[in-house]
Image (spheres, rainbow, N blue to C red):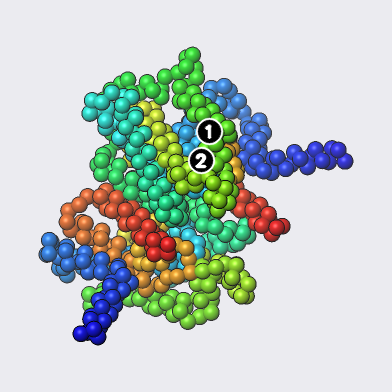
Amino acid sequence: MRVGNRMKENTSTRFINFIKNNLVLMAIVVLVVVTAIVQPKFLSAANLTNVMRQLWPLPFIALGMTFVIIGGFIDLSVVGMISLSGVVTVALIDPLGQVGAILCGILLGAMMGYLNGTILTACGAMIQAEVLFITFGMSSIYTAIALLLTNAETLRIARCIKPYTIFTALGSGTVGIVPIVLIVFAVILTIMHLFYKKTLAGRNISLMGGNKEAAFLTGCNVKRSMRLVYTISGIMSAMGAISLVSRVTTATATSGTGYETNAILCVVVGGTTLKGGKGSVLRTMLGVALVVLLGNCMNMLGLSTYMQTVMRGAVLVIAIWLDNRKEL
Amino acid sequence: MNVKTIAQKGWKIISKQGAVLAILALMIMMLFFDTNFYTAYNWLDMLRSAAILEIVAFGVTVAVICGGCDLSVGGTLSFGSIVAVMLINAGMPIWLAFVAAIIGGALVGFINGFLVVHQRTEPFIITLGMGMLLKGLCQVLTDAHPLTSLIPDFMKISNSKLFGSVPLLVVYMLVLFAAFYWLMRFTSFGRNCYAIGGNYEVAKYSGIKVIPTKWTAFIISGVTASMAGVLLASRMNTGSSVYGDSTGMLVNCGVVIGGTSFAGGVGGIFESFIGLFVIQMLTNCMNMLGLDSYFQKLFEGILIVMIISLDCFSRKRKRERV
């Protein structure tokens, strides 16, 4: 009797622990079930392919942001980096050809990220506030450069003379029902996950996020790790920009607006703490899934887009609050 | 020797106040161009354009001195403007609508304070999220359209002029400046704020009621933001959800540019006044010189990065010396 009772307790506590650890997964399941009951169209193939096409570039940005947040920092400059690298990529299709344009775009993203990291390490920014404002300033610099380059005009891929097949493939191509961009992203995600889990540089990022002093004293090159996370964020922003440009087939100097808060939202909802040190790349993807599904479900239920902004803000505030309560 | 020490002292004061240096540099630069920069009208206009952001900044400064930060002021500003215009259009007397908007701002500050002070979350991201929430709320309330007030008297609050030349907005700003200066300099609340920002634990063990004080600071920040929102709505005769889009970041940057540090415990209302004025002056100078708005954005970004980097760098050097 007693033994049975204990076993029952064990399974129930284990169940509760499982739910506690996988709150996001539960939320996704509940959301999907509820919406599917209220609006059966939600589970139709048309809607699901639509979701899979519409969610770019958020996963890329969130992936880059995850590394920055695990490192204990934050990056608001993704707005400027997405805008500038998107604009430059499209502008370079004609002179360099599509492969050259994509490579140049990614290289530019890496350079911008490296510049952010260098400025931050040079002035010794340590607390989140300083990082937040310096990256915000960098963001407006990048956006301003993009505005100056394009004169605030919209660049269209369709106007390019040279072929732009890669962009078309990324934007609307599919293998079976799986979009090509999803396959590309899956490969990058696997590489980044292995990089974070298996390499010394990846582990150093986590170490730096946990405690900078301790990381420095154990011989981890904190400055190099810092530059590394920002470079990753820059590269991911550039890739995100390319996926965005392919999807909407235009590039403007303000196309990155709003992605910084959304990316932070995905990372935090996924369970990476803003204090740094803890987190996982794969959990962020769950966060992305939740945020995107939330938006789609609200569309399906006929709520206005403004309500979605309210919802996102509320989710962000509540997620940070709950995350903080875990630590208390 | 004597001259050297004086020069050193002077350099110390100026290097502490990067913003004053920036103002001097801009003023000297403008001497070389033939513009209307040095006219009373232009200076009054600069003050009037800066007034809204200055009023927001006074409240934010209190929160920053306490070691917090409030990025939700942009949302609060829009929220205040919309609430005021909606209530006035619904037939409420103007003063009551004003009070209602301020109570709304205080409520936002109260929630911020609960999350940041009572629950001890990091203020930066959570207030950013709060700003996003408020912007969404404003859009839901107005359906993202600007909302025009139907009562002409409402416009008089901000648009009248004292003695026929001084805009009332400037007067409000100066009155609030004096009030906040007094609050932070000569009351126990203000001094407690500095103590809390300087070292939270020490302040706590010295018997300062840290949680209520810091909480009040956030409420003050919300109140000033919604007050500025109502004044802006009165100036434009319209409430809109886009008023606060860049306010949060700009005001917090301005506060830091003035010399109030995010580490807390350093700075003051006068410093913030100067900091925000630098931003306004830079915009004014660039307008005078006919630079296009993209260049203005570029220079604004460079200014923010430079001054905050310098702030960081000086703190780093101080750390290393210890």
Q: Residues within 10 Å of mark 2 (few under 14, many from 20)?
A: many
Q: Residue B175, percent across and down?
A: 50, 25
Cα distance in 3D space between marks 2 and 1: 10 Å
Q: Position of residue A286 (x, y in %)?
A: 32, 69
Question: From the viewer's perspective, is A319 left or right of B275?
Answer: left
Output the chain of dot 1.
B
Quadrant the C terminus of chain A occupies: bottom left
Q: Residue at x 41, y 22 (%)?
A: B159
Is residue B121 shown to the viewer in this render?
Answer: yes
Is disc 1 surrounded by few (<14), some (14 to 19) or many (20+) residues within 10 Å? some
In the foreground, B277 or A222 = A222
The spot of residue A133 in percent (x, y) is 51, 52
Where residue B234 is drawn, which disc sits there?
A: none
A59 and B265: which is toward the camera: B265
Q: Is residue A114 above or below residue B225?
A: below
- Which residue, given by chain and number where applicable, does mark 2 sit on? B62
Left or right placement of residue A292 versus residue A257 in this view: left
Look at 31% across and 35% down and name the residue there.
B82
Residue visible at 45% across and 79% down? A197
Q: Earlier in the sequence, mark 2 or mark 1?
A: 2
Amino acid on which the number 1 mark rests in the picture: Leu
Q: Residue at x 33, y 24 (%)?
A: B95
Mark 2, secondary structure of its residue? helix
Q: Amino acid at mark 2?
A: Val
Mark 2 chain:
B
Tell me the tag on residue B183: 1
**Labels 2 and 1 touching (C-beta < 8 A):** yes
